[in-house]
Amino acid sequence: MPDDELEPLPSLSVEDVRAAAARIDGRVHRTPVLRIEALDARAGVELWLKAENLQRIGAFKARGAMHAVGHLTRGERDRGIITFSSGNHAQAVALAARSYGCRATIVMPTDAPAIKVAGVSALGGEVIFAGTTSDERKAVALELAERTGGAVVQPFDHPHIVAGAGTATLELLDEVAVRTGGGTLDALLVPVGGGGLIAGACLAAAATGTKVYGAEPHGCDAMARSLEAGRRVAVPPGPTLADGLKPTMVGRLNFAIAQAHLAGSFRVSDEQLGPALVSLLVHGKVLVEPSGAAGLAVALAGLVPGQDQRQRSDQEPPRRIGVILSGGNVDPALVASLLTMHGGTA
Amino acid sequence: MPDDELEPLPSLSVEDVRAAAARIDGRVHRTPVLRIEALDARAGVELWLKAENLQRIGAFKARGAMHAVGHLTRGERDRGIITFSSGNHAQAVALAARSYGCRATIVMPTDAPAIKVAGVSALGGEVIFAGTTSDERKAVALELAERTGGAVVQPFDHPHIVAGAGTATLELLDEVAVRTGGGTLDALLVPVGGGGLIAGACLAAAATGTKVYGAEPHGCDAMARSLEAGRRVAVPPGPTLADGLKPTMVGRLNFAIAQAHLAGSFRVSDEQLGPALVSLLVHGKVLVEPSGAAGLAVALAGLVPGQDQRQRSDQEPPRRIGVILSGGNVDPALVASLLTMHGGTA
């Protein structure tokens, strides 16, 4: 058990998510909620898709980073912001720093794709390269913070990140209520990497009766295994198209929230992620990264209890399942190859 | 001069567009307006992108068809609706018929792509195949209407179609006003095929001072040539990626409106359309068909007067250019090939 398991955890609620929404208002997009009939027909339910792939920097990560940086004092910001990431969080912190007019240093792996490094640089972030593992990057970031007095913005296991990420679900539930005259979602599917997005979703949905489920790749199923074990389990990530869902372990705070609220976590394969991405592109005209398609892949595979139409009476209205499309940053060559493979059967 | 050139044209205004908006409310999507920083940086202006590719049936055509069918009486609808189209209008009419609970017969070319025929069938439309030219299809549709008493929904040159199409621009201008505290667009770029979309845009924008420009493929530039000639000119369509912008002649009503309001019409090449489509997909995460990328291609090529930053003082705020992304229905294999060609330099 790591030392920090003994520290008390902060208590969070939907009020923290509402406060986050107010703080980041105008600095991030209120992303659209998509309704796509061809996908509804396949899933046998109404799918309400929250398009965080259309968020600034192309992923929900902009929300948590903007919220965390918004909580810093002017003096803290002036000393510069530091983070470590191989993915969308890197660009999110660079964006948040620019939005608040301060400097950001991002520690990235030496093998980071050129396109992600360029994305951070284009937003004015300074990149330092260190090792290839998350631990190596974190050590360099903490050392830098120690030396400069700069504030470290955690990638996923922090109350500000969780509350910020939860604003996506809050907006989705608001929009469902408006568009259905006060209705809500029966279930919500959320991709799980470090667990910040789903922890925020749990908080935002707590009072609605919506069942929240995770969506994880087979072999990177740290949340499902941790829920089964009743404690956090480390899962060395196996190969998957969903490179954003590969943390070895879900966050401690995130797991505590998930354990209290989550209805379960489903596993999907590359053979489900690829076609889900392509179906969304062909029928919905929006591009997600494979990680961002995990929730949709669950819905299209019909894994959610109650999704099977044959188990419903004719009088029962179609169920409403929400899906967070978490991001859209993906190598164009991979998209071309998936379109060639699955475009004919989408 | 065709016989009908002598008939008086109906007089339309923004009030007709507002009435259309009220009539189709709830039956079509209010599509999102996208702001994509990477594309702004390239265009040197603020781009406000109206995402009609996310409209029902994947194109703005849903608006005009829904409006036209909404104007029919119950008795007219009961005799069935008839149209002729090789493209998005076919699905739009099938959707509108389903929405109003009546039958639709669509006359399509014998060489129509299977995917478009399947799209009409999936919406419950009945397909009749006739010839390969627009004139052949039209003749069969009119004969059928004569025989059955069914109402023909024109593809683009009709007041109901124009007013319905104009609602996209109305929504865009509304949203710009809300998000900028009362501001408006300096210019608006609209793809031109038969001219219904741009005629509607002219009506919707008439009171705002926004300059409306067309975007057409080289070789399919019937609007540009007609404006230059001062009368409608037939242009046998040349080869282009933008298969939705190939009518031989713009509509008579549409041209009359365009002639009164339009600031001009720009020509773009396949070498501009393909990269525009790919840049939007990579940076904006949304898919347009090549026709739907025509306005964006104009903006990325820097063709709009005043777009050149070097001609602006530092004090001048960035100009706002609206772009209608008119549709997103495109062969997945073509997208894969464009991504492979242009994905590395997007």
Image (cartoon, coloured by chain):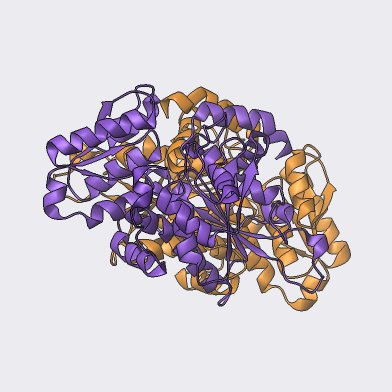
Chain colours: A purple, B orange
Q: Which residue is at the front of the view, B27 or A310?
A: A310
Q: Can residue B341 be seen in this snapshot?
A: yes
Q: Position of residue A166 (x, y in %)?
A: 43, 59
Residue that appears at 38% across and 26% down: A112
Residue A143: which quarter of the image?
Answer: top left
Instruction: Work out whether B269 lies above or below B257.
Output: above
Q: Which residue is at the front of the view, B201 or B93?
A: B93
Instruction: Work out whether A322 lies above or below A56.
Output: below
What quarter of the picture does the C terminus of chain B occupy? top left
Q: Which residue is at the front of the view, B63 or A119?
A: A119
Outermost residue, right direction?
A: B147
Horizontally, residue A167 falls left or right of residue B144, namely: left
Number of marks: 0
Horizontally, residue A5 falls left or right of residue B313, namely: right
Residue that appears at 71% across and 47% down: A301
Residue that appears at 32% across and 67% down: A19
Q: Position of residue A20 (x, y in %)?
A: 33, 62
Horizontally, residue B223 falls left or right of residue A120, namely: right
Q: Which residue is at the front of the view, A6 or A23?
A: A6
Instruction: Work out whether A228 lies above or below A310.
Output: above
Instruction: Work out whether A248 lies above or below A259.
Output: above
Horizontally, residue A299 falls left or right of residue A225, namely: right
Q: Position of residue B204 (x, y in %)?
A: 44, 64
Q: Can residue B112 be seen in this snapshot?
A: no
Q: Position of residue B257 (x, y in %)?
A: 48, 59
